[in-house]
Amino acid sequence: MTGKPARITIFVGAYGSGKSEISVNFALWLTRNIRQDGQRVILCDLDMINPYYRSADARTLLADNQIELVASMYANTNVDVPSLPPQVFSVFDNPNVLAVLDIGGEDLGARVVGSLRNRLAGEDFALNLVVNPYRPMTGTPEGIAHAAAEIESATGLRLHGVVDNANLLEIANWHLIEESYPIVTEGARLAGLPVVFAATMEMPEVVDVAQSANAARSAGVASKPGGLDDDRTVAALPVLNLVRSIHYPTDH
C-alpha cells in the first residue's frame, strides 16, 4: 500500500470479518512505512464482544515493533456500554500519535464508536468496514450494504470505505479475492463507498497482482458490476500483506 492514511483509522466488522488481524497489520504498516521521528503508533483494542479473537493476542508482536497497545478490561462482560480505557483518549489529545482502533461491528461495538463521535469531530479519521464475503451476513452485495447501513445508523458516522478481506482462514487467499471481488465492489457501490484496500496472506513475489487480475478479467471472473471504471479493477486495488498474528482456539 502507498499513500497518506488518516491519523486515526477505525476498523469495524462483524464476527469472522478478520478486522483484528487487519488492525494489527495496519498498525505494523504504519510503523514500517508511515511513522516519522517523534511519532507514536497506538493500537486500541476496543472489541468488547469477541474476546477470543482480539488484537491483544498479538501483544508480543506489537511490542517488538514499538507499537503501544491499549486494551479494554471489559470484554465479554454484561456491562451495557463499557467504560473505555482512559489511555484511549490520548490518541485524540496528541497530534503525534498515529492510532488504529479495533472495534466490533455489532450493536455494542457500534455504540462504542458512537460514544467517541464528539472526540472524532474535527479529527483526521477514517472509519472502515472490514468485509469477508465468505461469511453469511456479508456474502452478498445487499448484505454488505445492509451491514454498512446498520453501522452508520448505530454510530451516527459516515463510513469512509470497505476493506476486502476475503478469506477462509487460508494462507493463500488471493484467488478468493479475485473470485469474490465483484460481490465486494457491488456491495460497496450500493453503500456509496469505495473499496480502500484488500488484505492478503500472499507476498508480492508469489502473486503478480496485475497479471493475475488481468487473466481473471479475461475469463470474466473480475468483471465489475454496475459499470465501474477500469481503474477500480482488482489489479488497481491497494494490497495490505498480512503477517498472521492472531491464532484461534481451533489452530493446531
Image: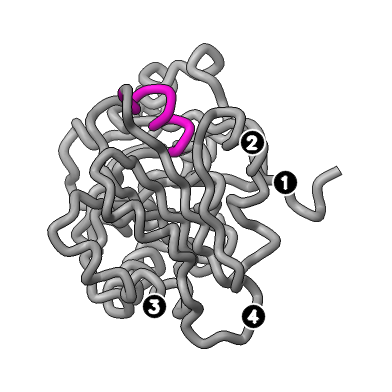
Mark 3, Cα crowd under 10 Å, few <14 / some 14-19 / many 20+, is many
**In magenta segment, residue 241:** no
Q: Secondary structure at mark 1?
A: loop
Residue closest to the eye, 162 or 102: 102
Callout 2: 10 Å neighbours few (<14), some, many (20+)?
few
Q: CA distance from mark 3 to mark 1?
A: 27 Å
Residue found at x 50% / y 78%: 82
Question: Residue shown at 23%/49% (left/top)?
Answer: 194
Name the residue carrying label 2. 244
- Residue 186 in view, yes or no: no
Looking at the rendering, in which quadrant would you find the N terminus?
A: top left
Residue under label 3: 111
**Relative to 88, 93 lies left or right:** left
Amino acid type indicated by mark 2: Arg
Label 1 vs 4, first from the N-terminus = 4
Q: Which mark is residue 77?
A: 4
Q: Residues at badges 1 and 2 in contact (C-beta under 8 Å)? A: yes
Query: Any magenta on residue 35?
Result: yes
The quadrant the C terminus occupies is top right
Front in this rendered view, residue 76 or 243: 76
Tell which tag, 2 or 4, sits nearer the viewer. Answer: 4
Q: Secondary structure at mark 3?
A: helix
**Mark 4 → mark 3, Cα distance in angstroms:** 15 Å
Q: Which residues are magenta?
A: 26-36
Q: Is residue 243 above or below residue 20?
A: above
Of residues 235 and 241, the one nearer the viewer is 241
